[in-house]
Amino acid sequence: QLQLVESGGGLVQPGGSLRLSCAASGFTLDYYAIGWFRQAPGKEREGVSCISNSGGMTNYVDSVRGRFTISRDNAKNTVYLQMNSLKPEDTAVYYCAASKGLTVQAMCVLSLGDYWGQGTQVTVSS
C-alpha cells in the first residue's frame, strides 16, 4: 500500500520552531518530487515548499522563504520541512505530497501531487 505519513506538528509559540517529517511506505521517494502544502480554515490549500527528486531544486512560497527549509533523505525515504521563526499565520494543517513528472514550481504553484498524506496540524499561538 502506497502511503505518505506526516509527523512533527504541534503547538508552538510565535518565534518557535518545528520540524515536519514526511515518510513514505510502499514505494521509494527517489523518483518523486515532494511538496509540503498547507490549508488553514476557510482558505485554499497552498504550496509551501517543494523539492525535486534529487534535492537539487527547491521552491518556496514568498511568505516562508528564509524561515522554512525543505530537505530530503532518500536513504530514509523521508522528506523534512524545518520551520523556524514561526508566525500565527503559519497555523494550518500541513500535508506532504509526491509527484512524478512535475517540476517543483508546477507542483507548488498548482498544488498538485500523485499521492497525499493525511496531514499534521501546526498551531502557532501564545
Image (cartoon, helix red, strand yellow):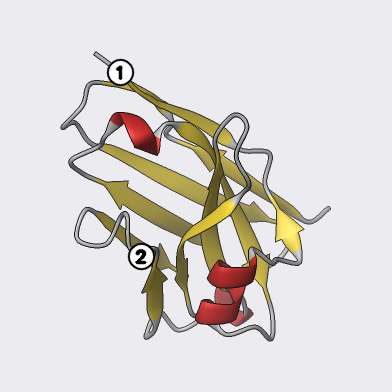
Amino acid type of disc 1?
Answer: Ser
Which residue is drawn at the image coordinates 26% and 34% (left, top)?
87
Q: Nearer the viewer, residue 100 or 15?
A: 15
Q: Which residue is mark 2?
A: 71
Q: Which mark is residue 78?
A: none
Instruction: Tell me, yes or no, if residue 32 can be seen here.
Output: yes
Q: Quadrant of residue 8?
A: top left
**Crowding near the residue tagged with mark 2, few <14, some 14–19, many ≥20 C-alpha atoms within 10 Å:** some
Apparent side of residue 64 relative to residue 115 in the rendered image (left or right): left
Question: Which quadrant of the figure contains the C terminus?
Answer: top left
Is 94 situated above or below 112? above
Give the SS element for disc 1: loop
Q: Which mark is residue 125?
A: 1
Q: Nearer the viewer, residue 19 or 89?
A: 89
Percent from the top left, x then y, of residue 121?
51, 28
Numbered disc total: 2
Apparent side of residue 65 relative to residue 31 in the rendered image (left or right): left
Give the SS element for disc 2: strand
Percent from the top left, x then y, of residue 75?
46, 68
Give the spatial CA distance, label 1 vs label 2.
Answer: 26 Å
Amino acid type of disc 2?
Answer: Ser
